[in-house]
Amino acid sequence: MPKAPNTTPIPPLATIGADELVAMDMPPIRMVVGDHIPAGVLLLAGDPKVGKSLLMQHLAVCIATDTPAWGSLPVDGGDVLYLANEGGQRSFRERMVKMLGHGKAPARLRIAETREPLGERLECQLEWWLTEAADPRLVVIDTYSSVAPEGRGVNRHQDDYNALAALADLGTRFPDTLLAVVHHTRKAEGEDVMHRISGSQGMTAATDGNAVLSRQPAARRCGLSIRPRNAEESDLLLERNADLTWSVIGDDERAQLSEGRQRILGWLDAHPEGGTPKTISSELGLDHDSTRQYLTQMAEAKQVIKPKRGWYRTTSGDEPVAA
């Protein structure tokens, strides 16, 4: 028997004139962490054990106590909900005690565990808390895999998009709140660090911003690359302290380079005509072979220019230094 035709009337497409849209009075985007992270859904990915949970737990403490995030970035204090699905209360408590030292634990930071999947009842639970909280500022879901819905397996891109779409809708209705989802990275080729976020591009398309935490060669240092939809891209260099808190020690691409490379760039800045590895290593008191190796790698990464054999200088003003 042939399928009966669908007789449900199709509603007309709602449109708005460009002039009307431009004339609309819209509130500015709410920034939650300095000038780097706005409100909305943020997908924070990183390698296992790189410090994603520690970083977000410290941010939760900073916002709940109205103190600068990661040592220096301004925040607006508010209520925080942390879904500690990985590690549970015991692990969260041990980290909290070490972070606080002799300080008082913030009552505005609430901790919970749930296995309700995204796209089903989890958003209802979050909406209840967001509605009841006096001034909700941050929700952390740690981790995505703990609340990931089962995909249908037909279209992975669509499954990944749908998993975060309902959370994105919640972010639209609570425009002063950051909804951060902790996730994992994968091995990936290419220069764009965002390609390392696990899953299809459907996940990153559904969010308001994406970030990747990568460990740097220097001990305890990590680079945080942030790519929000409604703010400028930024790169932060962070260092983990002995008490498990974090500190921002640089907020530009050069700050993410190793100390040796930064010293070489500093010398080249002071000598625009450039120089040889022998001259640079001699004046900086660095090992010659290490300096030559640094410069070779920096030239390949377009951090310096090699106009002729054995000679290096900084890039021009139109060519930014790549991290």
Image: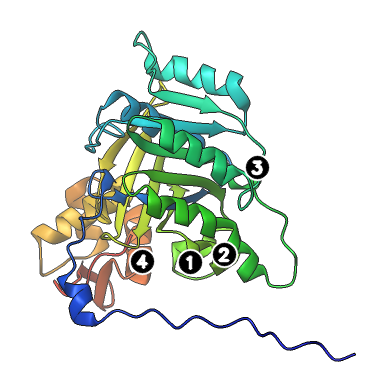
Residue 288: image location, x then y, percent:
31, 54
Residue 307: image location, x then y, percent:
23, 79
> Which numbered disc, 4 or 1, marks the residue closer to the eye?
1
**What amino acid type should be assigned to the residue bearing mark 3?**
Ser
- Element type where label 4 sits in the image: helix
Vertical placement of residue 5 versus 301, above or below? below
Q: Which residue is mark 3?
A: 146
> Which numbered disc, 3 or 2, marks the residue closer to the eye?
2
The picture quadrant where one finds residue 274 is: bottom left
Q: Which residue is mark 4?
A: 296
Residue name at image x 25 percent, y 31 percent: 68
**What amino acid type should be assigned to the residue bearing mark 1?**
Ala
Which is nearer the N-term, disc 1 or disc 2?
2
Q: Which residue is mark 2?
A: 161
Q: Residues within 10 Å of mark 2 (few under 14, many from 20)?
A: some
Quarter of the C terminus within the rendering: bottom left
Q: Nearer the viewer, residue 88 or 124?
A: 124
**What amino acid type should be assigned to the residue bearing mark 4?**
Thr
103 to the left or right of 319: right
Which is nearer the N-term, disc 3 or disc 2?
3
Q: Which residue is mark 1?
A: 205
Vertical placement of residue 14 versus 201, above or below? below
Residue name at image x 68 percent, y 52 percent: 149
Which is nearer the N-term, disc 4 or disc 1?
1
